[in-house]
Amino acid sequence: MPVVQADRLRKIAEVLFEKAGASAEEAATVSRHCVSANLTGHDSHGIIQVPTYIDRVDRGHIIPGAPFEIVQESPTTTVINGNWGFGYVVNERAMNMTIEKAKTANVAAATVYHQSHVGRAASYPLMAAKEGMIAMMTADSGRSPKAVAPFGGRMARLGTNPISIAMPSNLEGPFFIDMATSAAAAGKVKLAQARGMSIPDDWVVDKDGNATTDPAALSDGGAIQPLGGAQGFKGYGLAAMVEIFSGLLTGLGFGVEPTGKHNDGVFMAVFNVAAFRPLDQFKQEVTEFAEYLKATPTAAGFEEVLYPGEIEHQRELKRSVDGIDVEDATWNKLAALAQKYGVSEIMD
């Protein structure tokens, strides 16, 4: 398993995306988001996705240079059709627009539809937190094939339906959550399969509804369980609400359509902290709150209490120095693409 520095991974991805038909700007944006996911420890949303995205470009499921279409707009809201563009590109632009509206109107929201995979959900609320805003985002896979069973069920009816919320603070690393409403993200199951690893027995049920540690069971008719184990009705309830925000409110609907296109629907909202509290005071209180949480005596088996988002910050610091592990299966796929495009030297 090669260990590769982040800058080199970004360059490899950029070259491959450009060869696949993306503009230099699109290639840079998608590559930056992918490698950022690796840096923070979310390898399931990182460089492993590059061959999948290029395959979707080849099949017409992602359209490089797709128009960014504002379907409906008010001073505080925007409805955006991404026209099957790269989700990273469409969603980043949508969040920037929503941040700018919140600077003027104090609260702003947007829905986005007909875009490809948006990757790590936290990437977008964190943009707002850097601007002194609170932001939340929910996402689902539109009417793409589903992976998650409702609580008590054994057939997939929902996406992994993540939700992310970020807060501005004076902490060294950002204060945020980024969580699937399922026991695990589908990408983490696929990552385990790519690495030849087993999965916890409460992540997936096989096609017969039995718990399994085999990640391949998911693609063989199985389903991921909702977040919460025996209390999975809580994760199921959250997933259903995310589906309504990101599927129904966007107009994508629910269920599965026959095209097979991955179609992320997104709802995002941004709140200008200064409309409620002086920003400096709020940021300092969030910082003190995090320190208060960290001062909790540790339970058995724990060495440290972390504030939400701190583990990603620690991983990013470490991987920025040590490099990123890339499983052989992914590295070989990247090498095959480089050979196909006549740029094998980028892998040396």
Image (cartoon, rainbow, N blue to C red):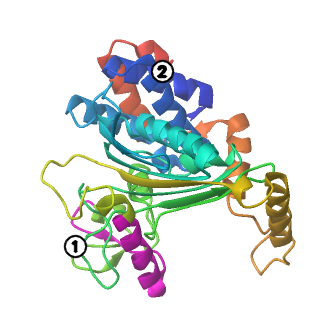
Residue 158, image x, y percentages: 31, 67
Q: Nearer the viewer, residue 338 or 87?
A: 87
- SS at badge 2: helix
Quarter of image, res 8: top right
Residue occupying the point 79% across, 53% down: 279
Label 1 crowding class (10 Å Cα cut-off): few <14, some 14-19, many 20+? some
Q: Is residue 32 above or below residue 103?
A: above
Residue 233, image x, y percentages: 42, 84
Secondary structure mostly seen in magenta is: helix
Whether residue 310 sits left or right of residue 41 in the image: it is right
Q: Is residue 22 magenta?
A: no
Residue highlighted by disc 1: 207
Q: Nearer the viewer, residue 254 or 74?
A: 74
Query: Which stretch is magenta?
Result: 219-244
Residue 9, image x, y percentages: 54, 28
Label 2 crowding class (10 Å Cα cut-off): few <14, some 14-19, many 20+? some
Decide if residue 210 is in sight here: yes
Amino acid type of the residue that numbered disc 1 sits on in the rendered structure: Lys
Amino acid type of the residue that numbered disc 2 sits on in the rendered structure: Met
Q: Is residue 229 magenta?
A: yes
Decide if residue 196 is in sight here: no
Q: Nearer the viewer, residue 8 or 227?
A: 227
Residue highlighted by disc 2: 347
- SS at badge 1: loop
Labels 1 & 2 near each other (Cβ < 8 A): no
Q: How many marks?
A: 2
Quarter of image, res 267: bottom left
